[in-house]
Amino acid sequence: MPVLVAAALLPSVHAQPHKIAAGVRPMGRPAGPVEKLAKLPPDERKKKLEQLPPERRAKVEQQLEKFKKLPSEEQERLKRQAEFFQKLPPQQQQAFRQGMRQFSQLPEARQASLRAELNTLSHIPDAQRRARMNSDEFRNKYTAAEKQILDKLSPAYPVD
Amino acid sequence: MDAKLPQPSMEERVSTDMTAAVALERDAELMLRVRAGDSTSFTLLLEKHRGPVIHFIYRMVLNQAIAEELAQEVFLRVYRSRESYEPTAKFTTWLFRIATHLALNWIRDGKNERGQESLDGEIQEGVGRQVADRSRNVEQVLVYRVRLKEVREAIDLLPAKQRAAVLMHKYQEMEYSQIAKALACSESAVKSLLFRAYETLRSRLSHMA
Amino acid sequence: MRCPVQHKENSEILLDYCARTLTPEATLEFEHHMAACVDCRMFAASQQAVWSALDAWEPAPVSADFDRKLYARIEEHENSSWWKKLAAWSFASPLPWSSSVAPIATACVTIAAAVMFYLPPERPDAHQARQNQPKVESTDDVYQVERTLDDIEMFKQLAPPASAEQM
């Protein structure tokens, strides 16, 4: 029941999944702040990051280094997802982040299962998604808590 | 008559001031992040200031439902103004300026006559919370009921601006300069408001010592 | 010390003492004065009674659905059309506006929008010149980077297994 209430409270802003522009960046679109920072020479980047406290600075540098090692296609996809996500209403973002905190506490095996399910749910329209999540097969596969996590993640998860 | 009050030590005062300064800077930093599009920072600001804003407005308008509605309007305006936010004043000063403006408008528009909760209703609720606390006996609950009625009536007597000044001074522990900005008046005007307000309150409540 | 009760220019000392916001030196000075001044002792005692009485006014708990209602209003505002937002902003600015300023401001913006629509487009060289000017980086960019990288980490956790392993 609480899951149903939670599902009812989450606004379904889009009937269709959140499709974001795939492929080549449209002409004239300016580089995002991550790109700008990544392209700076190391000493200029260091100077820029001095605005942050030491721990946060170290975290950003580490994240940036890992990010730069990804294939460019992967980089583009993740940036598009983040950019799209940041434009969603605060309530949806908040619910999503809450769902992610709960997700990261699950055992690895369950995360893998939910990850696959989320990718499926994110590619189908809202009505179909709700029907799938209310099915007996779904209820047998996932606990109520896991369903709640998927409920929070699937409406706002941006897909290509 | 010994009226000496225990005063905080210099170390406590410095520590409190530094903590307060850091906390205030943190609020402005969070609001700048909201300006940059970070909704999590807005949530953090809401969690921190939700209670104080609602309680302040409640003590102004004396109706819990109206107070929550007006408080929502405060945070909605904070969110709507995010793109033009500049940390020229302390965040709480700006926040309570909006809250004061909305509460004063509501009082001025005369809605308080229609919307004000009955005194008995509010006291019953307060007494209910007291009864739920099993550590208090019946006599203590009755004393609480009487005191609450007197405090509320005394606050109700104050003109709206005096009321706002007292509530910000007493419950939010805001400085005279902050209260002045919130009320859009001078510091000397704030001191005058406070002095008159406390004079009224002393005449009504000092017997409760 | 001139008695704060007798001399109005010192009266805020009384409030500051009761609010415990005086400096230690000023506190000592005032307490020394109070030892010999009945008026100030009585004032401090009665003001302390007021503070204690106000402390007794315990607030009611906030409704459980306060945040939900607030976010619903925010979303409604975000989804409303631009002209409704302008009207709402004009008539409900955080700062007090006189009743005549808001409609005038709305009219001015509407006229400005119409004029801009009918003005000839800017010459390409002027536009290019502006584009070439160096942009001043602000602190916001760093926060934006931080937030975006955190969000990227989040989406990495949800990506199909081949991508997740690379981060």
Image: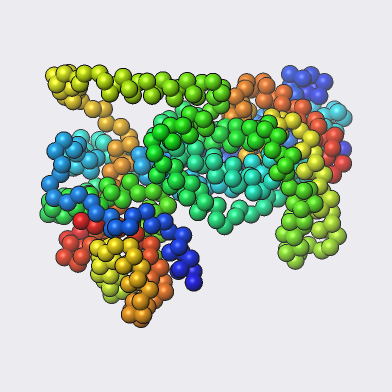
Residue sitting at x 73%, y 47%: B117
Does residue C45 show up? no
The percent coordinates of residue A104 (x first, y second) are 34, 65
Does residue B143 show up? yes
- Color scheme of the displayed model: rainbow
The percent coordinates of residue A153 (x first, y second) are 34, 61
Residue sitting at x 43%, y 47%: C75
Of the 4 image quadrants, the one containing the C terminus of chain A is bottom left
Residue sitting at x 16%, y 65%: C162
Q: Quadrant of residue A123?
A: bottom left
Direction from residue C99 to residue C74 in the image, left or right: left
The percent coordinates of residue C135 (x first, y second) are 23, 27
Q: Quadrant of residue C49?
A: top right
Direction from residue A90 to residue B161 in the image, left or right: right
Direction from residue B165 to residue A61 in the image, left or right: left
The percent coordinates of residue A150 (x first, y second) are 35, 66
Front in this rendered view, residue B66 or A79: B66
Front in this rendered view, residue C134 or C106: C106
Count of marks, rendered view: 0
Residue sitting at x 75%, y 60%: B128
With respect to residue A86, does B193 lie above or below? above
Direction from residue C8 to residue A158 in the image, left or right: left
